[in-house]
Image (cartoon, rainbow, N blue to C red):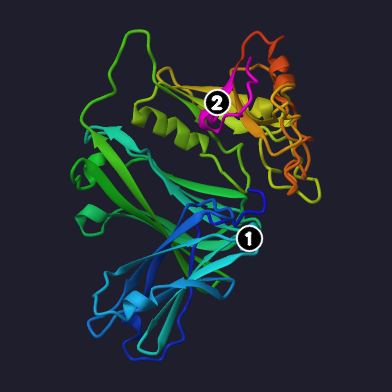
Amino acid sequence: MKKIAFLFLCFVVLVSFDTQANESDYGIKTIRVHPKVIKPGTEVTVNVLVTGDFTRGNPVVGIYINDEKVIDNREIAESPVSLAPTVSLKFTADNRFLSRDLELKAVMSFEDQRYEILYPNSANKDFCADAPWRVVGEDAAIPVEASIFDGDQWECNLDWIDISDVNNGGAEVAYYDGGGESIDDHRWSYLFDNLIASDFVIVDGYIEMVVQMHYRELIIVPYDFYQYLRVKVADRNFPRIAGWYYGDTHYHSAFTDNFNERGGSFAMIGRCGPAIGLHWTMITDHASNNSGNQWPVGDFANDLEDHEWNALWDSCQAYRTSDFRIIRGEEVTVKNDATTGGDDGTNDNTAHMLTLANSNYIEGPIGPEAYPESGNHSNLKPLTSRLQLLDPMQYGIAYSAHPEDAWIVEVFE
């Protein structure tokens, strides 16, 4: 993401310095920020889950950006209304969200005590857990993957990962003992691949789970990451029609790795696709062709490059089965080079072109300044030039990644 706050899935619980005897009974359990990608002008919602006995009054909760308060609930907190444990605050993002050094935190004040929780703009480690959005039947496998990104920038020691069942009072369902393992890889993942739907209590057709990761930095400083996941347990497959096959036309693998998005591992792709009920998926990784050796590296330095084209093919083949096919493709950012409609392509008028089954790599934006702040995208490749590269190939189809973001001029004529 180009100079957009990297509010991904990472948050850190800060130790409070309060001295009150009942200090441990109060605090902020979690903070969740939506959306994950925030630009100036975006409406931001921050949900803060507080803990404590508030029968004597309501806590005042404020949201701070770089230690400057942007909003709080003081007006309603000082009213006679009794508040729920969850405080939801909304504000409009400003230009501070263009900085990668941005820091967002929630602060709770109650009876002259102060409690904080940090949701940082992390240029280093980030955390994520994922599961298929649906499975079929109580005997269905439910793969769950927990990941740590950018450990090579600032290592941590993983103690354990726990999966608990929300519908069963938080009972533990699965556990991974990290044993204090030092995580210093660019991407580290652990796949829970032996879980089934009946391991959980299913309520109204859904499983609710929490994946908790406990780790330490600087050997001794403890942190916890929580990811809430919801899985629908369907009672039937998708309708089957002879000669028709279900698939996903736009999915990113680990070869997509930038400040905007990180794709899933192939191990997870190979398990999730069949669990959902798909026959195939398209791996449409971002084709930025930026070298990680460039300086500055650029926002898209770890996306799919020409020299990785064969490795992407090998990964697709390694995790495909006779029942689930993984098809290689790309997502290429292009500029509008239309000769009509008053747009010469130098303005902020770009689109994402997906390709399917093309045999050769199609180059996308080049260099760390492929997306300059000025909005001048004239250094991007024109759409027609990318389409022409498909012509000599035996196979290959191009289509729009985000049809709702269509240009106002006709370019697919």
Horizontal placement of 48 versus 356: left or right? left
Secondary structure beneath dot 2 equals helix
Above or below, comparing residue 176 to residue 332 in the picture? below
- Does the rendering let one see residue 294? yes
**Is residue 53 at least partly visible in the picture?**
no
| Residue 15 spot, x, y in % from top left | 47, 78
Residue mark closest to the camera, 2 vs 1: 1
Q: Does dot 1 land on a helix, a strand or a loop?
A: helix
Corner quadrant of residue 386:
top right
The residue to which callout 2 is attached is: 316
The one of 406 and 157 positioned closer to us in this rendering: 406
Compared across the picture, whether 318 is left or right of 59 comes to: right
Where residue 258 sits in the image (x, y, percent)? 63, 45
- Which contiguous range is marked in magenta? 398-413
| Mark 1 crowd level (few <14, some 14–19, many ≥20, 10 Å Cα) | few
Is residue 401 found left or right of 391 in the rendered image?
left
Horizontal and vertical percent position of residue 266: 51, 34
Relative placement, left or right, of 137 versus 280 is left
The structure residue drawn at horizontal position 38% and vertical position 24%, both measured from the top left corner, is: 278
> Badge 1 is on which residue?
95
Query: Which circle's residue, 2 or 1, is located before the other in the chain?
Result: 1
